[in-house]
Image (cartoon, grey):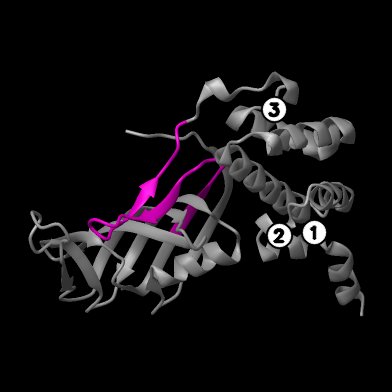
Amino acid sequence: MKFTEANLGRIFILRLEHGDRIPDVIEEFANGNNIDSATVLFVGGSEQHSKVVVGPEDGTVEKPVPTVVNLPGVSEAVGVGTIFVNEEKAPKLHMHSAFGRNEQTVTGCTREGVHIWHIGEVIIFELTNNSAQRKINPINGFELLEVQNVNPDHIDHCTKGYVKLDGIEKLLNDLSGDKPKEVVDSAIKKLMELEDDQVKTDLVRLIEDAVRKAAFQSDFIWLAFIKDIVQEKGLEEFLKPKTIQLLNFEELMLDIQF
């Protein structure tokens, strides 16, 4: 077993419309709102002929072929799933649901397409500061979850306490202006010098979380502070286009004014 810790981020409440298709509608929402990791709850109704993966045709073969069934009629539905980005940094939903009609129940994966019948309620719990990602397994073709364990041996006391995931969370708090800019600069420099890809990945996610929080609170002083750090450390190439757009808030404000 491998594991990574995470922090609870934003919480979203979605009302899906009649005809919306899972997983598409949830993945599109996640992509538009910069959600890289999340837990997802779903309750509602599913349309007739929605497709459900109910297992492999043969579980002993190296590359299993999925068994897909169509729902025989409009069904009650409840599901739980996760969102994690794949190797192309696109958020991918993995959800299993149970569909009930009369006394019959079908349970399986929604990846082949489940259409909403009038009622669809979804709660998304964002997870931040973690290393989880989906990667294709070359043996069986599955897009599997990959995580990296936190290694306490990588602690570098020169970073003034900013180390691994605990340090990333502390640095996020200090980016709000609680510490002088020189201290945060020094910490980021030390983190970037470490030969640890996970630390750099966490640092990028930290910055993106901080930018979203600042933009949501209309804290332009904080945004300007983070923008200076990003430019000085040459981190633009690692950030998502939407994050860069939020950092260029002066241009957005001009667009609004004119």
Q: Residue 248: x, y in percent?
A: 83, 63
* Left or right position of 134 against 74: right
| Disc assigned to residue 162 | 3
Residues 32 and 119: in front is 32
Q: Residue 23: x, y in percent?
A: 39, 67
Gap in Å between the C-alphas at discs 2 and 1?
Answer: 6 Å
Q: Residue 50: x, y in percent?
A: 25, 75
Circles 2 and 1, Cβ within 8 Å, touching? The answer is: yes
Q: Secondary structure at mark 2?
A: helix
Q: Badge 3 local density, few (<14 within 10 Å), some, or many (20+)?
A: many
Q: Residue 57: x, y in percent?
A: 9, 64
Q: Secondary structure at mark 3?
A: loop
Q: Amino acid at mark 2?
A: Thr
Q: Earlier in the sequence, mark 2 or mark 3?
A: 3
* Left or right position of 11 against 110: right
On-image quarter of the N terminus: top left
Q: Amino acid at mark 3?
A: Tyr
Q: Is residue 134 magenta?
A: yes
Name the residue beneath numbered marker 1: 247
On-image quarter of the C terminus: bottom right
Identify the residue shown where x is 77% and y is 55%: 215
Q: Badge 2 local density, few (<14 within 10 Å), some, or many (20+)?
A: some
Q: Where is residue 160, by image quadrant?
A: top right
